Image (cartoon, grey):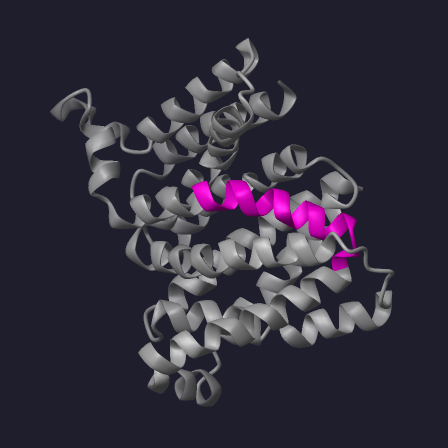
């Protein structure tokens, strides 16, 4: 069951990303990030009404604020990355999350990667390199230089580093409450706490969000479906397993980028994303 939920997470995540990229053409990306949660509130409300309010453990009030704090930084950066970069590059780079998680464990806990883990790291790095494989003729390090120059890619790499922390907090919050309760509380909390920033920086954008929601409502709906699937899966399986399956969104993102946004090098980037996915699976199994 957890696999189907994680697979649903990947499909809804890729769909939301495509919708958000489209919405970013008419709305500031900070406004898109806020609207993604604002218009998800009705879905989360129904989900909580159906499931009911659970017994909430004290640990929830430690895990939830940690996830909120990290995502208040990560989510605006993520929607900006979608706007600045190509979907077929940005979403596959989401597969760097387990790599950063491994690095965090090493720095904080001293846990050294196993031999299979090193193999997974190598595949992820190789896949990221091959996202710009067509530029190799200009120099062997050119693919890495292109990633470094790509603002969308740089932003997404920062996001994946933050998500390597928030994914652990998400699981802690779910296990100390329920998927329905956590997603509802998190959504309300994000909407409220991010609003002051918008009032300072994007006040006209708030009114536009409410008066012209056509492109924003689907972002919220698909985002809520993605989060419900992900948090439900986290309640059934380990974080690394769920996130590894979620990274199939990288493959879906390449397809959507090529088919809907006419991005180039579809075949090469699909191959590169598949290699990165293999690396994340190897890391999950190590």
**Left or right, 194 with reference to 227:** left
Q: Residue at x 46, y 28 (%)?
A: 276
Q: Residue at x 45, y 35 (%)?
A: 96
| Magenta part of the chain | 161-179
Tell me if residue 119 can be seen: yes
Q: Is residue 80 left or right of residue 148?
A: right
Task: Tell me if residue 205 can be seen.
Answer: no
- Residue drawn at point x = 63 percent, y = 33 percent: 240
Residue 16 belongs to the span the image colors magenta: no
Furthest toward the left, the residue is: 138
The picture places residue 116, in percent across and down from the top left corner, at 56, 13
For the point 50% across and 20% down, which residue is it?
120
Give the left or right position of residue 147, taking residue 64 as reference: left
Dividing the picture into quadrants, the one containing residue 147 is: top left
Task: Indicate yes or no whether the magenta region holds residue 164.
Answer: yes
Task: Answer with the quarter of the image where residue 234 lies.
Answer: top right
Secondary structure mainly formed by the magenta segment:
helix
- Residue 145's spot in the image, x, y percent? 19, 33
Q: Is residue 44 above or below residue 96?
A: below
Coordinates of residue 70 in the picture (x, y in percent): 50, 53
- Give the x, y percent position of residue 41: 64, 74
Q: Is residue 97 above or below residue 190?
A: above
Q: How many marks?
A: 0
């Amino acid at each position: 069951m957890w696999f189907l939920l994680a697979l649903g997470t990947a499909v809804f995540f890729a769909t939301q990303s495509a919708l958000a990229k489209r919405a970013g053409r008419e709305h500031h990306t900070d406004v898109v990030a806020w609207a993604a949660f604002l218009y998800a509130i009705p879905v989360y409300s129904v989900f909580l009404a159906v499931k009911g309010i659970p017994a909430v453990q004290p640990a929830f009030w430690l895990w939830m604020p940690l996830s909120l704090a990290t995502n208040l930084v990560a989510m605006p950066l993520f929607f900006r990355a979608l706007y600045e970069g190509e979907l077929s590059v940005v979403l596959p780079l989401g597969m760097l999350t387990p790599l950063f998680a491994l690095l965090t464990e090493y720095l904080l806990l001293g846990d050294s990667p196993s031999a299979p883990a090193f193999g997974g790291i190598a595949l992820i790095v190789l896949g990221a390199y091959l996202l710009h494989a067509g530029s190799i003729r200009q120099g062997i390090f050119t693919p890495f230089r292109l990633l470094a120059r790509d603002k969308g890619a740089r932003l997404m790499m920062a996001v994946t580093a933050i998500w390597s922390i928030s994914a652990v907090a998400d699981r802690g919050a779910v296990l100390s409450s329920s998927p329905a309760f956590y997603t509802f509380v998190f959504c309300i909390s994000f909407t409220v706490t991010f609003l002051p920033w918008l009032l300072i920086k994007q006040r006209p954008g708030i009114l536009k969000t409410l008066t012209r929601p056509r492109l924003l409502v689907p972002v919220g709906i698909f985002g809520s479906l993605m989060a419900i699937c992900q948090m439900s899966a986290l309640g059934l399986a380990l974080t690394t397993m769920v996130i590894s399956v979620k990274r199939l969104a990288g493959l879906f993102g390449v397809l959507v980028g090529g088919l809907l946004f006419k991005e180039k090098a579809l075949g090469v980037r699909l191959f590169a994303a598949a290699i990165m996915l293999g690396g994340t699976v190897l890391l999950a199994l190590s």
